[in-house]
Amino acid sequence: MENKFRLVVIGVIENDEGKILVGKKRSDSNKKLAGKWHFVGGNVLPKELPEEAIEREVLEETILLLKSIWIVGLSTRRVKEWLSPSEYICTIWFYCLPKKNFIAKASSDLEEVKWIEKKKKFFLL
């Protein structure tokens, strides 16, 4: 059996005040995270670099432009076939800084975005 991988990018976006951006997936979405808060991110498209994917996903979901991005982590997990057509998901975690004077707004498949306090026990950045 051939191994199948889905490549995903997730951005931990920190503003000048040290707060982290999260988005709430639209409640009417058919996606697993419907109605839940999460970091911004998504799938890497064919022929797209992960760095391009995180910039695109952040722009699509929050109308926010990034000035700096760094890869800070990589995680993989096995997915049961009934949850996903992929057998494995490989997630690349990015630490991102937004461009100044841009305001994050919910767009695309988000119904709300907000900046939250960074909790040291959750972040090693």
Image: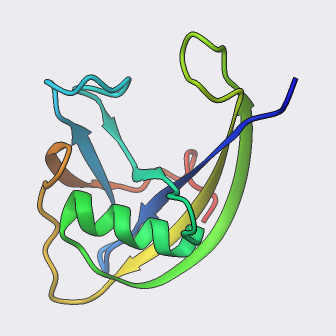
Q: Is residue 122 left or right of residue 42?
A: right
Q: Is residue 36 visible?
A: yes
> Residue 99, percent across and down?
29, 87
| Quadrant of the snapshot with the C terminus | bottom right
| Quadrant of the snapshot with the N terminus | top right
> Residue 51, percent across and down?
54, 74
Q: Is residue 56 above or below residue 12?
A: below
Q: Is residue 19 visible?
A: no
Q: Is residue 75 left or right of residue 121?
A: right
Q: Is residue 99 above or below residue 85?
A: below
Residue depicted at x 47% and y 66%? 53
Q: Which of the 4 quarters of the picture holds residue 47?
A: bottom right
Task: Farthest residue to the top: give it.
Answer: 82
Q: Which of the 4 quarters of the picture holds residue 55?
A: bottom left
Q: Is residue 122 above or below residue 81?
A: below
Q: Is residue 112 left or right of residue 117?
A: left
The one nearer the camera, 107 or 94, is: 107
> Residue 98, percent across and down?
33, 80
Residue depicted at x 66% and y 14%? 80
Task: Farthest residue to the right: give it.
Answer: 1
Residue depicted at x 28% and y 80%? 65
Q: Which of the 4 quarters of the picture holds residue 36?
A: top left
The one nearer the camera, 13 or 88, is: 88
Residue depicted at x 53% and y 69%? 95
